[in-house]
Amino acid sequence: MREELQSSIGIYSPSFLKMHIDVYEPLDDIFNLSPKASAAFIHEYVHFLQDLTTVYGQKNIISVVDYIKSVNINQRQSNNRNLNIPYIPQEERDLGVYYNSELQKLHTGTSNKVAIGTILSVGTEIVPTDIGYKTVDVEIVKLILKLNAHSQQTEYSFGAHAIIESMAFGIEKMIYPNEIESPQDFCYEAANALVQFCYPELATDPLNVIALCDASLMYYNPAAIFYNMLMEMKTSKFTPTSPLDVYDFIHSNVEIEFWGLTRINEIYNNHTLTAISCINDYFTSEIFAPNKQWVDDTFKNANNLRISDWGFFVQLASSGSLKKNEIFKHLFKLLGLPMVTNKTGAAYFASPVVNNEAVRPDALWAINQVYNIYINSKKSIIRRCAMEDWCRESCRQAKIEDYTDYRCIESPWERAKDSDKLCVFAQVWKTWGLENEIPIVV
């Protein structure tokens, strides 16, 4: 399952296009934020771009939608109104969702916090994995770390999680060095540490590592691509004249086939269209109809950006602060801003789509809360809907009576039975035909 991506003062909810910057200052003018808020912002915005512009990000969006659909369909067809959570996909009941979740675990790698450590050795392991109609060999990259805090050794599975966070942290450091204290989690340093261990000559330019991360995320198993291409570069003594050469090296040396498609741009185009269709399947009611145009425009604009400029992340990282960063200005003009909240509960959103004031990005945030309930995440156990502060602030700004109550924390699904003032969680729950379903922890 997909876990939230957390930095020191920011959070991104992958597959749900939602950012949080843990500061009190307003976020309505992103070109004039404090340096600290700007550093947190660009880190989370990179995660937003990773969702939109990589095959791996779009593949995960598709998988998450399939999982939610599977839960909803099976629950509505059940004779039991109690929805057992966590909802764990089963091989017989959930078809491809089960196999996707098993692959996801392997591709993600270690995602729990691990102290900063020194790499002692690197190896790979082949894990035969059943995907329903055949068995595939999944290559896992294993690191043995010596932790700085203690002398013991630990095994670390270098996967997509480490690549995603290493890339975002690398870009953040290049644009805003030393603005935020480095998080004491190995995942943020893992990609650079692996390059330093295997082929330090490539790491003399940090943009090479960012390019290697980014190019690897255009494949289903980013870690295997990252490591194998790194070793191929070492063997062939590849020395890029520009970080953009890293993209050419990888895409020309990796052979891939996806339902008859063999070119990476064709596979990426396929995933973009599928991701658009999947996300828009969330919006089953006319009240969320404008969201479909927003999703369509945003993903297609992102696709055009990637196809026309594979190395835009490299340019972003090397173009300075947001205020003067022309690449970021272009990205913002093209893709806007997903829903982003701050510590006060205020929310901000921007999009070049026509009638953007009618778009409801909060619907995806509410669906994120539903998803967290289904998987019974740690945050969901504490508070079933984390939108309470934003809802309260929205009521204040709209000068209406605060409609939040104890159900926001304990049972937000009960709000779908209210006669009026349905919150966005309740609207989603009701449009999915789940008014009578009761999540029960088993």
Image (spheres, rainbow, N blue to C red):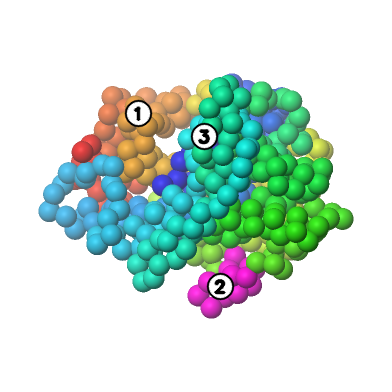
Count neighbours of disc 1 (C-alpha within 10 A) and say few if under 14, some if 14 to 19, many if 20 or more. Answer: some
**Amino acid under disc 1:** Arg
Q: Which mark is residue 154?
A: 3
Q: Is residue 205 left or right of residue 252?
A: right
Q: Is residue 69 left or right of residue 185?
A: left
Q: Considering depth in this image, is 61 or 102 the residue closer to the camera?
A: 102
Image: magenta residue range? 255-268
- Badge 2 element: loop
**Amino acid under disc 3:** Thr
Q: Which residue is mark 2?
A: 257
At x 34%, y 42%, the residue is 375
At x 56%, y 39%, the residue is 144
The majority secondary structure of the magenta stretch comes to loop
Q: Considering depth in this image, is 377 or 52 the residue closer to the camera?
A: 377
**Location of residue 177 in the rendering, given as x and y in whole percent from the top left corner:** 76, 29
At x 56%, y 73%, the residue is 257
**Location of residue 429 in the rendering, given as x and y in whole percent from the top left corner:** 30, 46
Q: Which residue is mark 1?
A: 383
Q: CA distance from mark 2 to mark 3?
A: 35 Å
At x 64%, y 53%, the residue is 227
Closer mark to the observer between disc 2 and disc 3: 3
Q: Is residue 405 left or right of residue 78?
A: right
Residue 183 lies in what quarter of the image? top right
Q: Earlier in the sequence, mark 2 or mark 3?
A: 3
Outermost residue, right side: 241
Closer mark to the observer between disc 1 and disc 3: 3
Question: Can you say whether 182 is above or below 60 in the image?
Answer: above
Q: Which mark is residue 93?
A: none
Q: Earlier in the sequence, mark 1 or mark 2?
A: 2
Residue 198 inside the magenta-drawn segment = no
- Badge 3 element: strand
**Location of residue 119 in the rendering, given as x and y in whole percent from the top left corner:** 63, 37
